[in-house]
Image: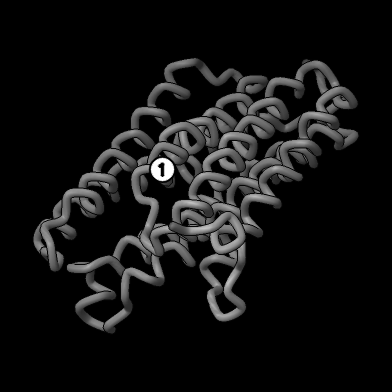
Amino acid sequence: MISLLEVIAIPKDDPIAFTFFTGYMAMAAASVFFFFERGRVADKWKLSLLVSGLITAIAAVHYYYMRDYYMVTGENPTALRYIDWTLTVPLMCVEFYLLTKVAGAKKSLMWKLIGASVLMLVAGYIGEAFNPPGGSTSHSVMWGVISTIGYIYVLYTAWFGEVAQLANSDKSTPTVRRGIRTLAWFVLVGWAIYPIGYMCMPGGWLNTGLGWSSANVDLFYNIADAINKIGFGLVVYAIATSSDANSATA
């Protein structure tokens, strides 16, 4: 029988446990910040900041349970993590739509981004959760490739497709254009950490090629979540509080 003290104690030599606890507190603190600051921004940015707060709040709740799961079992909380991503990643895609809405973005853009993100997540979950015991490289690669298709669509849309074109067409708010480009960098660099973690699982290329174990998966994922989710919200907050974005016509 494991005592409560044993569950909440953080081993000093376990960086994964450290990032679970740090991620939980960071997400919770970011949620409080975004929800409180929502009342100080112009009406046209309130929904964007609300979505930012929801992203980090949902992640904080899941990290609360994931940290306990990891401390008790020592295993990757795969199901909990993908439940979190299924809710938060589409909301991150919604941010692109909300920020380009003033430039004429249609709801079809939002649904296409959501659809691509769901494809990315569902394929990734199948690749991780249903990988045969011992790891199958063919299974890992097949579902990894399908997941990458969804990722590439979001990446292309943010850098060269509809999101980028709408942002560039809005000459009145350079802060919004810079903010969308920053979010695109998050998708390019920040989201790239997730495939690294995926390829560390048994059967993954980094696992079979370099010997990186699945123990690295949670470390990569926890760091990526904190950077991407909180970072997304801070970029939106910077746009919402900028002078040119608020002087432009809503």
Residue at image mark 1: 80
**Residue 80, position as x, y percentages in the image:** 41, 43
Q: Residue furthest bottom?
A: 210
> Residue drawn 63% across and 30% down?
54
Q: Residue furthest front?
A: 1
> Residue drawn 49% across and 60% down?
71
Q: Who is closer to the viewer here, 41 or 122?
A: 122
Taking the image as drawn, is residue 162 in sight? no
**Residue 40, position as x, y percentages in the image:** 90, 26
- Relative placement, left or right, of 25 versus 155 is right
Assign the N terminus to one quadrant of the image: bottom left
**Residue 228, position as x, y percentages in the image:** 58, 51
How many tags in the picture? 1
Q: Which quarter of the figure has residue 13?
A: bottom right
Q: Who is closer to the viewer here, 225 or 21?
A: 21
> Residue drawn 56% across and 63% down?
6
Q: Who is closer to the viewer here, 21 or 233?
A: 21
Element at label 1: helix
Q: Which quarter of the figure has residue 202?
A: bottom left
